[in-house]
Image (tube, rainbow, N blue to C red):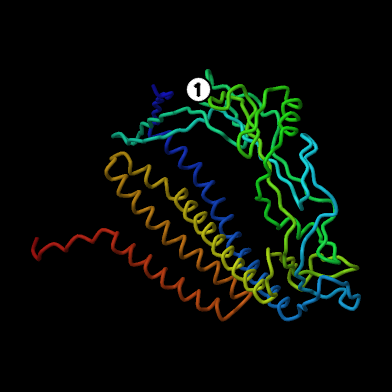
């Protein structure tokens, strides 16, 4: 038998109009945030690209075995074995590892609420929304607040007695150099650390509950085969000592972030990598991030225009079929406007940062504007024919 229930809510045409009017304010905020994000992102991308170009032109390779004072202040590329000066430990359970970093991951078995809604339009502009809430027990890394459930009774989650955490070695060296934490934080912490019996006993004592080893985790609860709400799974992962390649500023025996004219450079990659390859990877990462933020900015503009124009759909929903048609039109117009405004903002940003590319993008914006005007003409009703002579 499924643990779920259904809730039916009705909204009048008047209340929907009120919500649509409020939505205009939300839409304007989304448009502002999306526009600012797009403009800022283009500046960020240009500054990052110029920073990497500057770094690639001045970087020098130095051996990891010796610190040469004449390179102080320079952007250097170093490859060597990253090692910790001492073990890193989890102070709550006494877990210790000879590694660069240690992370603890905690999951709790708890109730989770999921919902699915379907909205039906009614003649006169009102709507009826049918929402089905379902409940299941799942392992989750964060505490789920069951007091916010639609039906909290019988689905109570206890507080999480311990959370996740991470720790790094006090001092990490790369040959003769000391690595700044800005580099150490880039090393992946993903090597499982199997708990021994001492760790299991420490967990049981600290939480005052039974605990057993379960693979690479410690299970906290009465029955590992049949977990109950509130049971825990705790596992640890490390960043082992390893060979890495870094690009940063040499200063007094340390490798730290390098301050270029437009930004900072602090690159690290596992293994032996040339400076050219590392800068190429960083440039590709910059391009990827730029497109991700562009996509986010476009979505903010699209949803912003949707919210601004939603009032027209609600007005037309007095006749549900007509409202659906208007809704489709609003979606198309919002998409075209988001593309037009987004492209224009990006073009203006490029005009500010890189004029030639900005002019090309403005050309794309003009094409979108023409498409928008054509769509508007097609959607507009044709004028009635003139009456015949003598009528």
The residue lying at 74 percent from left, 28 percent from top is: 201
SS label for mark 1: loop
Residue at left offset 75%, top offset 70%: 79
Residue ID for mark 1: 151
**Residue 122: x %, y % from top left:** 30, 34
Image check: 227 left or right of 378? right
Furthest toward the left, the residue is 390
Vertical comparison of 153 with 372: above or below:
above
Q: Is residue 349 left or right of residue 361?
A: right
Residue 132 place in picture, x, y as percent: 41, 29
**How many dots with numbers?**
1
Local packing at callout 1 (Cα closer than 10 Å; few below 14, some 14-19, many 20+) is some
The quarter of the image holding the N terminus is top left
- Front residue of 296 and 219: 219
Q: Is residue 66 left or right of residue 3?
A: right
Q: Quadrant of residue 354?
A: bottom right
Against 368, residue 25 (above or below) is above
Nearer the observer, 355 or 187:
187
Is residue 263 shown above or below 300? Answer: below
Say which residue appears at 16% left-offset and 63% top-offset: 386
- Quadrant where the C terminus is found in the figure: bottom left
């Amino acid at each position: 038998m499924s643990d779920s229930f259904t809730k039916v809510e009705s909204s009048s045409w008047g209340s929907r109009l009120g919500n649509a009017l409020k939505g205009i304010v939300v839409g304007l905020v989304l448009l502002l945030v999306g526009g600012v994000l797009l403009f800022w992102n283009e500046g960020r991308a240009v500054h990052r690209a110029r920073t990497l170009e500057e770094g690639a032109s001045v970087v020098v390779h130095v051996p990891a075995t010796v610190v040469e004072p004449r390179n102080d202040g320079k952007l250097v590329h170093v490859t060597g074995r990253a090692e910790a000066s001492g073990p890193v430990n989890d102070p709550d359970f006494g877990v210790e590892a000879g590694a660069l970093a240690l992370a603890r991951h905690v999951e709790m078995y708890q109730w989770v609420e999921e919902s699915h809604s379907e909205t039906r339009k009614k003649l006169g502009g009102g709507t009826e929304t049918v929402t089905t809430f379902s409940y299941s027990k799942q392992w989750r890394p964060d505490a789920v607040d069951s007091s916010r459930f639609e039906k909290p009774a019988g689905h109570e989650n206890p507080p999480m007695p311990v959370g996740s955490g991470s720790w790094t070695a006090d001092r990490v060296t790369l040959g003769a150099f000391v690595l700044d934490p800005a580099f150490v934080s880039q090393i992946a912490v993903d090597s499982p650390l199997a708990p021994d019996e001492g760790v299991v006993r420490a967990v049981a004592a600290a939480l005052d509950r039974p605990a057993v080893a379960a693979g690479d985790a410690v299970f906290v609860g009465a029955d590992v085969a049949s977990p109950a709400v509130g049971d825990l799974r705790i596992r640890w992962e490390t960043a082992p000592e390893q060979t890495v390649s870094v690009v940063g500023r040499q200063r007094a025996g340390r490798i730290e972030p390098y301050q270029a004219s437009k930004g900072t450079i602090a690159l690290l990659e596992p293994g032996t990598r040339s400076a050219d390859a590392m800068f190429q990877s960083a440039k590709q990462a910059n391009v990827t991030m730029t497109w991700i933020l562009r996509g986010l900015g476009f979505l903010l503009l699209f949803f912003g225009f949707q919210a601004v124009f939603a009032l027209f759909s609600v007005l037309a929903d007095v006749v549900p079929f007509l409202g659906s048609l208007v809704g489709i039109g609003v979606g198309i117009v919002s998409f075209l406007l988001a593309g037009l405004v987004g492209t224009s903002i990006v073009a203006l940003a490029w005009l500010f940062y890189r004029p030639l590319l900005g002019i090309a993008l403005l050309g794309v914006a003009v094409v979108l504007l023409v498409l928008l005007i054509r769509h508007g003409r097609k959607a507009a009703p044709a004028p009635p024919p003139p009456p015949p002579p003598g009528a």
